[in-house]
Image (cartoon, rainbow, N blue to C red):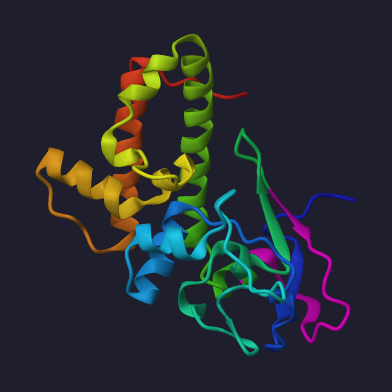
Amino acid sequence: MSPLRQDTPFSYQCNGCGRCCYHKRIQVNPYEILRLARNLGISTGDFVRRHLERNGPYLRATDDDACIFLDGKQCSVHADRPLACRTYPLGRRVSATGEETFVELAPHPQTEGVYGQDGSIGAFLTRQGAYPYMEVADRYQALFYRMFDALQPAFESAPELAESVPSAMLSGDDTPAFMEWLDVDQIVGHYCDKQRLEMPENPAAKAELHIAAIDIWLDGLTGGKHEQRT
């Protein structure tokens, strides 16, 4: 079967049954955390501690394995829902070289959603407001590839380099280290203090500074060298 792309015929009408909000692991990136934290009126640090699993950047689930933000059959944070929810019932994949493809996810056996082909994947994504999320997600994916490539050999050859991580990026308790990288408010606040910048309120602008702060730290480890993945 040919891979699905943005011009592939596709349509989907959600009818609000809520069944897709069970038995899923929804991964979130820092931009999505910013949007959700703002929706709830809390800091990104509080969001990470309250609403993410402790073994990865995934939204917590309730005892009956529903998304923590499902209220009856409705999403309580719908205006700021993550990209995975916006693309559903499609999954989006972007390779290390930037190739974008889509897959149709298996629907719930009792879904009330209606599938069709009277449109395109691109048109569906537009209606879902997915493009701003996709743009930021791609930037974070590239950044995390760079972090992995830089940190793994650096820490293996010189474990003391871990001490060079800025204090604003380290946990002071038993919080898993990865969570500190997701606390955008803290990292951007630290960055703005050093750069004498005003802390932005707009999530996209704040994500931009978050990426800049991590880039600067990685430049310190790699001497500013960026390796292109192939």
> In the figure, 103 relative to 70: above or below?
above
User: Residue at point 71% right, 65% down?
Assistant: 24
Q: Residue furthest front?
A: 173
Q: Nearer the viewer, residue 153 or 205?
A: 153
Quadrant housing the C terminus? top right
Residue extending furthest left? Answer: 196
Looking at the picture, tell me which residue is in the foreground, 100 or 9.
Answer: 100
Residue at the extreme top of the image, as rendered: 157
Residue closest to the eye, 39 or 157: 157
Q: Judge whether residue 77 is colored magenta.
A: no
Expressed as whole percent of the image width and height from the top left, the position of residue 44 reads: 36, 60
The answer to which quarter of the image holds residue 18 is: bottom right
Q: Is residue 152 left or right of residue 26?
A: left
User: Residue 120's spot in the image, x, y percent?
Assistant: 70, 68
In the figure, is residue 186 to the left or right of 20?
Answer: left
Q: Is residue 36 above or below residue 58?
A: below
Q: Which residues are magenta?
A: 101-123
Q: Residue at x 29, y 30 (%)?
A: 216
State left or right for residue 202 relative to residue 225.
Answer: left
Query: Total label count?
Result: 0
Relative to residue 114, is residue 90 depicted above or below?
Answer: above
Q: Is residue 46 above or below residue 182?
A: below
Q: Position of residue 169 (x, y in %)?
A: 33, 39
Q: Residue at x 59, y 65 (%)?
A: 60
Name which residue lies at 77% across and 55% down: 4
Choose between 14 and 77: the one closer to the eye: 77
**How far from the left and from the top, in percent, is residue 36?**
43, 68
